[in-house]
Image (tube, rainbow, N blue to C red):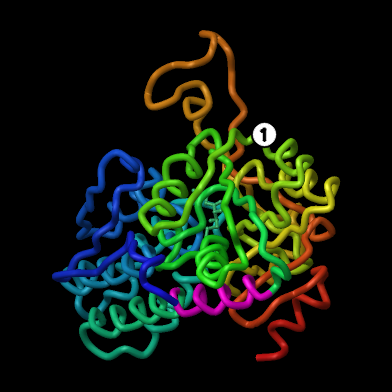
Amino acid sequence: MNSHHDNIRAVAWRDARLYLLDQRLLPHRQEFLAFETAAAVADAIRDMVVRGAPAIGVTAAYGVVLAARAAFASASSDWRRVIEKDLALLAAARPTAVNLCWALERMQGAMKDVPGDPESALLHEAVRIHEEDIRANRRMGELGAALIEQPCAVLTHCNTGSLATGGYGTALGVIRSGFASGRITGVFADETRPWLQGARLTAWELVQDYIPVTLLADGAAAWLMSQGKVDWVIVGADRIAANGDAANKIGTYSAAVSARHHGVKFMVVAPTSTIDLSTPEGKAIPIEQRPESEVLSLADQPIAAEGAAAWNPSFDVTPAGLIDAIVTEKGVVLKPDTARVAALFDAG
Ligand code: MRU
């Protein structure tokens, strides 16, 4: 893959600190914040400095390195007990993206047998998680783009790119690969109210990487499909249940319903770290409710009638029956159901 279409990294470990590109300021300002404590990392995840399921997982892994450093400095023989509080803070930062708990479990595995000061062993594991995520994204990019039979335009929702992952992206990774190979001729992006991940982040990321993008209001997606302007909707996921039901940014379900109605194919792209086999179906996925203020205001300016309340679920669940393909780094699951999702893991 040409690096021409892959130039952004939002999570970095440098000089013994964690740096996060502050996504709340994009697209107007590009500023990295430095982090030295796990509590500050947990706040950054909750407050959306960093967001996107895989990026949250990678960030939490680096947060554990910071937690271990502090725990070992305060109680060298008892650091595994002291670190528990920070692990709990990180785990509670956001509820829907399962990559967060997945990454914490990987780090806890690495904590088990490490002798003496754990920092370098845990940093090694965090870097592995980060690099594996980028490799998985590149593989999913190839697999997902290969499903697109003839050159076409696609629609995406939210931001699933380098900003939302260790790098390259899930759905946006497929879009990067598909654009580079000529299978994808154009990208429509929902603006993604209320947080505007599409308008602020996806549009910025694609412009930075020389991929033309056309924004639309979320409510225009069904009409776009009715005009025959896109052949595929390509999205990411925050958690996929064992039966293939997929939680993703609010508005994804509407896009899936519209896609089926109009004969447009629907692709979910996510690493296996997003698949939660312990959650049997979508109904059991915890859905994060975010503050009413995100709906009632825009860029800190009130936009709604004073006195109105707001309902602000951050995610919805698309039933597996509306999904044509789930693309993972281990392979593609067509028409997902419990047996087909399980087979992905049986294959090794
Ligand atoms: O609330 P966010 O911005 O963290 O939500 C992100 C999404 O819903 C993404 O689509 C999802 O995490 C997949 S990203 C690779």
Q: Is residue 291 left or right of residue 243?
A: left
Crowdedness of circle 1 by 10 Å Cα count: few (<14), some, many (20+)? few
Q: Residue at x 29, y 53 (%)?
A: 21
- Which quadrant would the C terminus be assigned to in this image? bottom right
Is the residue 103 above or below the residue 211 in the image?
A: below
Q: In the rendered picture of this protein, how many numbered marks are placed on residues?
A: 1
Is the residue 243 above or below the residue 234 in the image?
A: below
* Residue 318 appears in the figure: yes
Q: Residue at x 21, y 74 (%)?
A: 72
Secondary-structure class at tag 1 = helix
Q: Residue furthest top?
A: 306
What's the magenta bit mostly, secondary-structure-wise? helix
Q: Position of residue 326 (x, y in %)?
A: 70, 68
Is the residue 346 above or below the residue 207 in the image?
A: below
Which residues are the magenta region?
134-146
Quadrant in which residue 83 is drawn: bottom left
| Residue denoted by label 1 | 220
Quadrant in which residue 109 is drawn: bottom left
Q: Position of residue 219 (x, y in %)?
A: 67, 32
Residue type indicated by callout 1: Ala
- Which quadrant would the N terminus be assigned to in this image? bottom left
